[in-house]
Image (cartoon, rainbow, N blue to C red):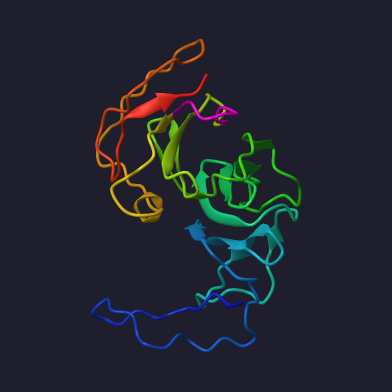
Amino acid sequence: TQFIDVFLLRQDGNVPPLSEPQEPSNRVSLPDDMEIRDGIVYVTSAADRSVRAYRIEPNGFLPEKQDSRTATEEYYSDILLDGDTLYAAAFNAGRIDLYTIEPDGMLPGKKPIFSSREDPASYPSHMIMNGGILYVTQLGLNRVYAFVLGSDGLPTTSPSSSTDPSTRAPGITSCIRLRVRSTVDLPHPEGPMNAVTLRGSTDIDTSATAWN
């Protein structure tokens, strides 16, 4: 699809079967993930390999054209907002890109301010943040990577730790989504990490092997 549909919820909270007609229609090139904050919709645009920002209009609809967008870069499977930083999972490149959100909520038409090390075989698909750690499911590796964030919000270039490959389900299905259900205690050493175990409960195995 090339649209973001808008549904007016019923009084009982249910979603109606049909979306509201929009004229003119917003044109989003194959949206895959979306975040909303302070009246602005941030959405991935697969066809032009960017992230777009739309200001929600008073009637709840989106404008026909985006208000801002990042430079053409990569196909992003997932985005995450934290403060003035937008984290984007570059699916085909196998890395995490960071963009600075302007004070007015708009996106700069620039390249990422930071990119993690590329691993095209990893296919990062989903991200969550908890306790200063960015967790990323790696669809191609059946693993979850953990990146320790610095005080500036920047992750380490390479993952700080990783789960063992998931074997609970055939193929890659068990590594698509991740949810932390309790506080995770991950040490923040000053030097290289040799081994670490993620203590907490996640939807997949948390026995981890650290990266040097």
**Residue 45 on image: x %, y %:** 63, 64
Is 159 colored magenta in this rendering? yes
Q: Main secondary structure of the magenta part?
A: loop
Residue at 60% over, 42% down: 95
Residue at 31% over, 25% down: 185
Asked if residue 66 is positioned above or below residue 131 in the image, the reply reads: below
Corner quadrant of residue 114 = top right
Would you say 16 lies left or right of 95 here? Answer: left
Quadrant of the snapshot with the N terminus: bottom right
Would you say 13 lies left or right of 53 here? Answer: left
Is 151 colored magenta in this rendering? no
Q: Which residues fall within the magenta stretch?
A: 154-161
**Residue 186 on image: x %, y %:** 36, 23
**Residue 49 on image: x %, y %:** 69, 59
Which one is in front, 105 or 147?
147
Which one is in front, 75 or 110?
75
Asked if residue 172 is positioned above or below residue 25 in the image, the reply reads: above
**Residue 99 on image: x %, y %:** 64, 44
